Image: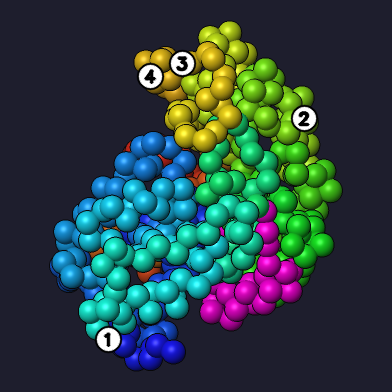
Amino acid sequence: MIDSSILQGKKAAFFTLGCKLNFAETSSVAQALQRYGVTKAGKDEVADICLVNTCSVTEMADHKCRQAIHRLVKQHPGAFVIVTGCYAQLKPQEIIDTTGVDMVVGAEEKASLIEHIMEGFSHKQQGTLAPQHSTLHSPLKDIRSFAPSCSRGDRTRYFLKVQDGCNYFCTYCTIPIARGRSRNGSIASMVAQAEQVAHEGGKEIVITGVNIGDFGRSTGETFFDLVKALDSVEGIERYRISSIEPNLLTDEIIDFCAQSRAFMPHFHVPLQSGSDEVLRLMHRKYDTALFRHKVEKIKQVMPDAFIGVDVIVGTRGETPEYFEQARQFIESLPISQLHVFSYSERPGTKALDIPYTVSPHDKHQRSQQLLHVSQQKLHEFYAQFIGTQRPALLEHASPRKPYMNGFTDNYIRVELPNQPDLDNQIVNVTLTGFNEEGDALCATIVK
């Protein structure tokens, strides 16, 4: 049994890459370490413990992970360096071979991350850490544990992890082999965490996970059951569903959100391609007709809703004709914004069996075309609300800054003169026009 007092007064540095789920998990680890007396290292301080939570969605992500590890090892000489996340699960040996890394923790062992940090740090302090480093890494078939996480980001919103892993095995994606099969905590545990957020004064929770619509595989419950239970938690005024597969976003869920107390008119739905043939090659579980139905259903019952969409360009099999089909389909949808990603070859994925490849130049051109579509759609979405009033949750800003930001219920970013006393407050604002940068609407508080 390791004496937890060994952590008292120590400094820690954290670096996170990738999705909101990773950031939520890192924040939860930082909060847990804080309870043992560990504080976050300042800008020029040398940390005793360094945690890198990694992503491996693209080759560029792997490269950024390696850069981050090298940088932290150099900035914090002698620190206990621990690496976790998707890159750690997929390529542990590659990380072990990195000079200065003391421990690699895979997906199954992440649930006991604090204990691993405590034990590894203790051994390093005593000079008994194995010279070949420590690797805690289980094969894919053994990844079953669910590590709960509910944490506050750098701003106002909290992030509640409700699910992990994925059973879909899309041909381009490594997440199922990095995070394991779909699993979740219970609705009761999620409600308890939301109640704790309310006790801390939090007003908005973003529901996160890898494939959150698949919630319930571990407990025999459903995502719809979860949505209804969270809606009843007193003190939480806003929920946002971070991302949900279109085939799992049921009409029942959409209708409930439209009349719910706290679920905002805001959805993020991954499309990945607007070509049915490319969707088939990707092994996605829907077609463009179903996707259009979901978007139009949302707009029917929530005309003011913000709809964000993920799209991948340049996947294997995406011929110029298929891309043009996708572009035209996307342009025809009443959506608000695109998140555009360029396809990256990932070892071990079925996409590598598809013969047609897209050149880097064409990937870039296609990405630029869709980013232009996104800019137009976002501008049009914002513009239609100029002159209207919306409730906005305002976010903390430095007292030195002249402006503070926030988001309306339907996810319009607002900008108004800084009033620190309004941090984490929901106020009614009038949207008056675009700011100088064109990325937010200026707002005045309704008296």
Circle 4 residues within 10 Å: few <14, some 14–19, many ≥20: few
Q: Give the image location of residue 217, x and y in percent.
A: 76, 57
* Disc on the earlier residue, 2 or 3: 2
The amino acid type found where label 3 is placed reads Val
The amino acid type found where label 1 is placed reads Gly
Q: Name the residue under label 3.
A: 358
Q: Give the range drawn in magenta.
A: 182-207
Circle 3 residues within 10 Å: few <14, some 14–19, many ≥20: some
Q: How far apart are marks 1 and 4 (CA)?
A: 49 Å
| Contact check, label 1 and label 3, Cβ < 8 Å | no
The amino acid type found where label 4 is placed reads Pro
Q: Give the image location of residue 81, x and y in percent.
A: 29, 66
**Towards the viewer: 271 or 402:** 271
Q: Name the residue under label 2.
A: 290
Circle 2 residues within 10 Å: few <14, some 14–19, many ≥20: few
Helix, strand or loop status at disc 3 = loop
| Contact check, label 2 and label 1, Cβ < 8 Å | no
Query: Closer to the camera: disc 2 or disc 3?
Result: 3
